[in-house]
Image (spheres, grey):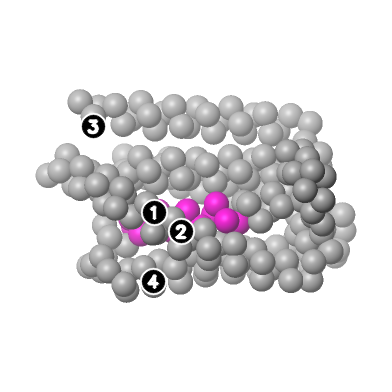
Amino acid sequence: MEQAKQPRVHGLLLLVVAAVFVWSAIRPTSYAVWALEVTPALIGLVIVIALYRRFRLTTMSYVIIAILVIIMFIGGHYIYSKVPFFNWIKDVFHLERNHYDRFGHFLKGMFAIVLRELLLRKTPLPRGAWLFIIVTGMSLAIAALYEIIEWLVSIIFKGGKASKDFLGMQGNIWDTQWDMLCTLIGTMIALWLLSKWHDRQLARLDHHRS
């Protein structure tokens, strides 16, 4: 019964993501920035959907992917440095910058659970300290790759407004380091808090596949 419900839950997640995508595409702050922010999320979605029947993930992994995609769609619509709710937080707490970008990188640490699932299901790597270390390293590597892509975009657009908005540094020369630190913290918290719950979902998935 539970197994039969999962495709409906996954379909609902896809509908929510699709609805947010349509909203994000309607009169964004900058279509150039929107395209830069949304394209990686769309590529990831296409891969996940294409592999759904051949390699179905746990519901936890799909929820995490949906959250991260939505975060990118929202950032693309408003521009990360101008998301209204975080502008309100900035004003109320007299902060120096809009922290939606930091929040997004922190949440991207949750993708470590998806990486954990791939390693546990497709490699002989067992649970334990090495799994934690390797997943953390992979998460940081992906974060670093994204920062390199942002840098390349700034070179291609030669420091234009779109590239500056995409980078979202807001005048902080250590923005890249802060972004990766946020991802590292998010990764470690996700692994500590969600691994046991994730293991239970993996066990149910293995049971239904056997």
Q: Nearer the viewer, residue 109 or 167?
A: 109
Q: Earlier in the sequence, mark 4 or mark 3?
A: 3
Q: Give me the C-alpha separation between circle 2 and circle 3.
A: 28 Å
Q: Earlier in the sequence, mark 2 or mark 3?
A: 3
The kind of residue on which mark 2 rests is Ile
Q: Mark 2 near mark 1, Cβ–Cβ under 8 Å?
A: yes
Residue identified by numbered label 4: 134
Q: Give me the C-alpha separation between circle 3 and circle 1.
A: 24 Å
Q: Which residues are magenta?
A: 105-118
Looking at the rendered image, the quarter that the C terminus falls into is: top left
Total labels: the figure holds 4
Q: Position of residue 5 (x, y in %)?
A: 29, 26
The kind of residue on which mark 1 rests is Leu
Majority secondary structure of magenta residues:
helix
Q: Position of residue 124 (x, y in %)?
A: 22, 67
Residue identified by numbered label 2: 189
Picture quarter containing residue 204?
top left
Q: Give me the C-alpha separation between circle 4 and circle 1.
A: 17 Å
Q: Position of residue 119 (x, y in %)?
A: 32, 62
Residue identified by numbered label 1: 193
The kind of residue on which mark 4 rests is Ile
Q: Earlier in the sequence, mark 4 or mark 1?
A: 4
The kind of residue on which mark 3 rests is Gln
Q: Mark 4 near mark 1, Cβ–Cβ under 8 Å?
A: no
Q: Position of residue 48 (x, y in %)?
A: 43, 45
Residue positioned 82% across, 45% down in the render:
91
